[in-house]
Amino acid sequence: MKNNSTQKPRVVIVGGGFAGLYTAKALKDAPVDVTLIDKRNFHLFQPLLYQVATGNISPADISSPLRLVLRHHKNTQVILDEVLDVDPHTKQLILKGHEPISYDMLIVATGVSHFYFGNDHWQTFAPGLKTIEDALEIRRRIYMAFEAAEKETDPEIRQAWLTFVIVGGGPTGVELAGAIAEIAHSSLEGDFRQIDTTATQILLLEGMDRILPPYPPELSVKAQESLTKLGVTVQTKTLVTNVTEEMVTVRQEEQVKNIAAKTILWAAGVKASKMGEVLAQRTGAKLDRAGRVMVEPDLSVVGHPDLFVIGDLANFSHQGDKPLPGVAPVAMQQGEYMAKLIKKRITKEPIEAFYYIDRGSLAVIGQNSAVVNLGFVKLSGFLAWLIWVWAHIYYLIEFDNKLVVMVQWGWNYFTQGRGARLITGEASPSTFVEVEARENKSRPHSVSHQPAVKV
């Protein structure tokens, strides 16, 4: 159905992440009407989300309001809402708080969320890192752990507060582990009177035989060496079998053991957004094990040439022997490709299939340390860290964000401080219940344990 007021094709984009926003930006001067729908009013630069979670930068530094980014795009409308359903036959979207929206071409880029391998109740005790709220909750838990340890008199419980377990040895897990190690061994050193923060234990658990599995083996080795120097204990071939409020149970080959820890963070596994299931039901599209939509070479859904899935929600298996990774560069290139495809369709020009150009992968370990795989060269250490810093600042959306983050990083580099280490939100009752329970243990009505607040 065409837009009656302009007779221009109506392109509807669901999701304001890298894939969706890059599509919208590239359609600025195209002869189409663009509608961008997202349940958040901002674009989040997820690669730096761990820096918010560890108090290095503030949420606003890596968030850009969608309306501000697209304010000069006169052909683009932004709608703050949630898509509930799609009817590919009438070409309409059903929204939660808006009348149905018609489209000529639909682009779905709603991404992925945490996956706990069928143990969703673990999320209460081990939050993942995908949203601003996740980052603030993790930041609260990290810094609250040191505050609780400062007041704890029982040595075993104090050590549990000073034990951090990160599940998953991919880039997010590595970055979190390195950042927490720097907090304990550098940023907070000398700030407390009853505890020695350098006694903090940081465990990084990975089920495979090495961390950073997608990277070349030699860079995995370099990354583990750098983490070890920072004070992180890396345990590979380690499978998590249970997570509770204060314990992680793991299996290492035939051995099962419990790890007492008050702060557990999840960086293992993702699952597709619910739009994947909606599209499968409405179009018959096939999904992979993670719920991602199997797409055609031009990123369309089988049998629906005007319906496209891009970004982390898409399983693109037409290049190489495995699907493209769910990383920001893939999403960016797919967004730019979608804009080219739409423009060429309007002029009835053919377009080749999507092809991802891999310009390399990066993961930061800590201050002055990173690993970079550029294909033709593999780097680690300070030079790799400089490349990582430049790349992340370059891809931040707004200029003022780039300037703020650059100044903030420069200041933190020389001061070794973390200016955004604020504890926000209410503390979980279990943070204080053990101390209070021991103080009142002689009373029959002493305080009982309460479950942690669900993230």
Image (cartoon, rainbow, N blue to C red):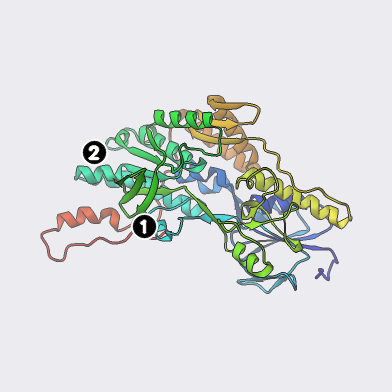
Q: Residue at x 52, y 31 (%)?
A: 217
Q: Is residue 31 left or right of residue 440?
A: right
Q: Which residue is mark 2?
A: 194
* Mark 1 secondary-structure assignment: loop
- First-in-chain label (1 vs 2): 2
Q: Which residue is mark 1?
A: 426
Q: Is residue 128 left or right of residue 328?
A: left
Dot 2, how many residues are within 10 Å of its Cα: few (below 14), some (14-19), or many (20+)? few
Query: Measured from the top left, where is residue 263 in percent x and y?
Result: 35, 48
Query: Measured from the top left, where is residue 253 in percent x and y?
Result: 36, 43
Amino acid at pointer 2: Gln
Amino acid at pointer 1: Glu
* Quadrant including the C terminus: bottom left
* Quadrant including the N terminus: bottom right
Q: CA distance from mark 1 to mark 2?
A: 24 Å
Height in image: 377 above or below 352?
above
Check contact, mark 1 vs mark 2: CB within 8 A: no
Q: Report the disc number at residue 315.
A: none
Q: Residue furthest front?
A: 254
Comparing 337 with 209, the one in front is 209
For the question of whether residue 282 can be seen, the reply is yes
Query: Measured from the top left, where is residue 408 in percent x and y?
Result: 52, 36
Q: Residue furthest left?
A: 442
For the question of whether residue 367 can be seen, the reply is no
